[in-house]
Structures are given as C-alpha cells and as structure tokens.
Image: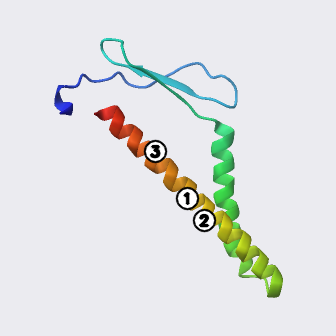
Amino acid sequence: MAKNKAQMSPWEKLPDHGWKTVHKVRQSPDGEVIEEVARERAATFAFFLAWVACAAGWWWQATLDSWPRGVVIVLTTLLTVYLVIVTTWLVTMQLIARFVRNV
C-alpha cells in the first residue's frame, strides 16, 4: 500500500523561538502536506528530572529505616506508576502517529 506513496522531504529546522519550542516542518513533493512539530524543552527536561527523582527515591529508601522509609517507598511507587503510565501513553501515541503518517 505504501509503495506508491511519494517520498516526503527531510526534516528542516525552522528558526528557534526561545527556550520553549523547536519547530520542524516537511512536505510532500507536491507541497500539499506540511507537518510541524513543537516540543517544549522545559517539559522534556522536567520529565527527565522526574525519572532521576524516581531512581534517587528507590536508591534512598534503601538507606532509611522505619516510617521515613515507608514514606519514601510510597511516594516513589506513586511516581514510578505515574511515569510508567505517561511513558507508555507517549510511546503509544507516537507509534500511532507514525502509523497514520505512513498509511
């Protein structure tokens, strides 16, 4: 099905608009399809920091005793579950978007 599809141009980076966004576009040979991707760098950095906090929480709980350990385990478990759900959702949406774009 995708064999007859015309190739799209490679990604081209547009001028930066500060810290928050990166813009990229590409289009078909006919110039009909234009896609733009905007990603907030601050959100990506915060997501990375959340994973670092999760790893630090699992490491830190091993050095604690009694109720502080329980508090850290509960908070780290909640953060881990949240991050796994969000990561799964983002990867799934990216795969669906890639599939739709290639059909």
Q: In the picture provided, is 9 more to the left or to the right than 40?
A: left
Q: In the picture provided, is 17 more to the left or to the right than 24?
A: right
Q: Which mark is residue 85?
A: 1
| Mark 2: secondary structure | helix
Q: Which mark is residue 38?
A: none
For the view shown, which residue lies furthest in the top direction? Answer: 30
Q: Amino acid at mark 3?
A: Met
Of the pair 72 and 13, the residue shown nearer to us: 72
State if disc 1 and disc 2 touch (CB < 8 Å).
Answer: yes
Q: Which quadrant of the figure has residue 35?
A: top left
Please tell me which residue is depicted at 24% across the width and 22% down the height of the picture.
Answer: 6
CA separation, marks 3 and 1?
Answer: 12 Å
Mark 2: few/some/many CA within 10 Å (<14, 14-19, 20+): few
CA separation, marks 2 and 1?
Answer: 6 Å
Q: Which mark is residue 93?
A: 3
Please tell me which residue is depicted at 17% across the width and 26% down the height of the picture.
Answer: 4
| Mark 1: secondary structure | helix
Mark 3 or mark 1: name the one nearer the start of the chain.
1
Q: In the picture provided, is 39 more to the left or to the right than 57?
A: left
CA separation, marks 2 and 3?
Answer: 18 Å
Q: Which quadrant of the figure has residue 31?
A: top left
Up-down: is 72 above or below 100? below
Q: Which residue is mark 2?
A: 81
